[in-house]
Amino acid sequence: MEITPEDVFIRMLKANGEEVGRFNEIPDSFINLMQRYRVGNQLIADDQYLFFTMVAGPTLFRLNLQEKVLNRFEQPPDYVTQTERDISSLQQVDHAELAAEVSYFTDNYTASYSLHRFTEQLLLIQYQNRRDVVDGKAGFGIQLVTKDGKFPMESDLLTDEWIVAAANGKIYTMVQQDNEYALPKVFVYKLKRYFH
């Protein structure tokens, strides 16, 4: 995925780097924010689909790689606070103002922070409410979505631990120690039930 000041698109490349196709039908409502605020892993692909999220909203996008059809799936959690406007473009403001705008977004709105393949049929979306993380509350939300766009959990999981990976039905989180010289701790969790 490439995000430029003019366009957002997905390029398909051969192993040698040669471009074989380009998909341009990607929402660009928050193009400046997407370009300036990159977070976690936001793309997952298999032989049939490319799944991706955008930082400013709780939508899971599914691109059919053969048919070039884009689907949207969303069930916004109640803890998600969405922004209604993009940040300024770099050409219109100086670096300090741009940093202030990005900081304002992270302090006041929810970021779709990362996307993971939880099992063969389930994807995991991690959301972040930064001010809650800073205040020591459960600032991360975990939402599971099936590959066909269903949301099987009765309610999202909330945690104060940052999810660094998810695979084979396990979630890996990281917690920074209070001692600045101590290595962070990694925890592994397995959900007993994640369907209604």
Image: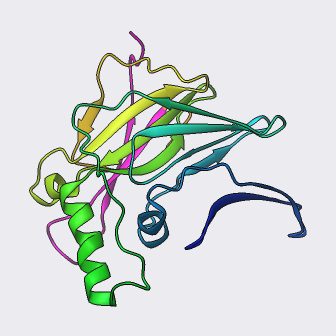
Q: Residue furthest left?
A: 135
Quadrant of image for the N terminus:
bottom right
Give residue 174's position: percent from left, percent from top.
33, 55
Front in this rendered view, residue 172 or 84: 84
The mark tally for this picture is: 0
Residue 170 visible in this rendered orientation of the protein? yes
| Quadrant in which residue 2 is drawn | bottom right
Name the residue furthest front: 92
Q: Nearer the viewer, residue 152 or 69?
A: 69
Magenta stretch: includes residue 126: no
Q: How is the image coloured?
A: rainbow
Q: Quadrant of the C terminus?
A: top left
Q: Quadrant of residue 141?
A: top left
Residue 173 part of the magenta-drawn span: yes
Q: Is residue 47 left or right of residue 186?
A: right
* x and y, in percent, of residue 125 in the image: 44, 40
Please give the name of the residue rendered at 24% of the width and 44% of the height, measured from the top-left corner: 81
The answer to whether 80 is drawn above or below residue 35 in the figure is above
Question: Where in the figure is residue 177, as x and y percent of width and height?
Answer: 20, 64
Residue at horizontal 40 percent and vertical 19 percent from the top: 194
Q: Is residue 184 left or right of residue 14?
A: left
Q: Residue 76, percent across and down?
A: 34, 32
> Residue drawn 38% across and 84% down?
92
Residue at 51% in and 37% down: 60
Q: What is the magenta range?
A: 170-196
Asked if residue 58 lies left or right of residue 159, the reply is: right
Task: Decide if residue 163 is in sight here.
Answer: no
Quadrant in which residue 104 is drawn: bottom left
